[in-house]
Amino acid sequence: MAYVSQADKKELAPAIKAVLKKYNMKATIAIRNHSTLVVKVKSGVIDFDIRDGYEDVNVYWIDTHYNGVARDFLNELLDAMKGPKYFNNDDAMSDYFHRSHYTDIEIGQYNRAYVCAANELEAA
């Protein structure tokens, strides 16, 4: 059964913040339902080319849905979110799900759009 605690979040946060700093991004780190580590990307210089300013990233399709710097950032962020203790022994065929924790990346929020600083620099 997936479980992530506040202590786990505290342990993973430095690596996540390092990736955010490397790509000049702003985000928050949270835990949802004691099972999912969530990173909500609020603003940054990467243009994700998203509609309505919000997108819930499918972590299994990062390589096919994103290109260039956006893909590199999301892959590094996902690796940092998993951390060294991550494991995944899921077997969907037998309806058996066992992993250390789930990961969720959100770009923007439904009520607050992602702010792309690159677009603001171009407009100025």
Image: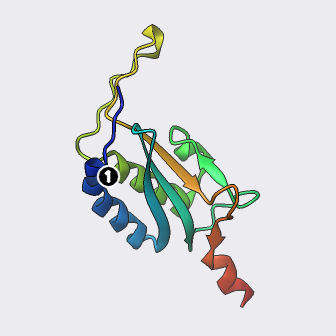
Question: Crowdedness of circle 1 by 10 Å Cα count: few (<14), some, many (20+)?
Answer: some
Residue drawn at 29 percent across, 33 percent down = 87
Residue 82 is left or right of residue 120, and the answer is: left
Residue 34 is left or right of residue 51, and the answer is: left
Residue 117 is left or right of residue 76, and the answer is: right
Q: How many marks?
A: 1
Find residue 101 and report its horizontal and vertical position in percent: 36, 37
Residue drawn at 52 percent across, 55 percent down = 71
Q: Amino acid at mark 1?
A: Lys
Dividing the image into 4 quarters, which one contains the C terminus?
A: bottom right
Most extreme residue toward the bottom is 124
- Colouring style: rainbow
Q: Secondary structure at mark 1?
A: helix
Residue drawn at 39 percent across, 39 percent down = 34
Find residue 44 and report its horizontal and vertical position in percent: 55, 72
Find residue 3 and report its horizontal and vertical position in percent: 34, 35
Q: Which residue is mark 1?
A: 9
Dividing the image into 4 quarters, which one contains the N terminus?
A: top left
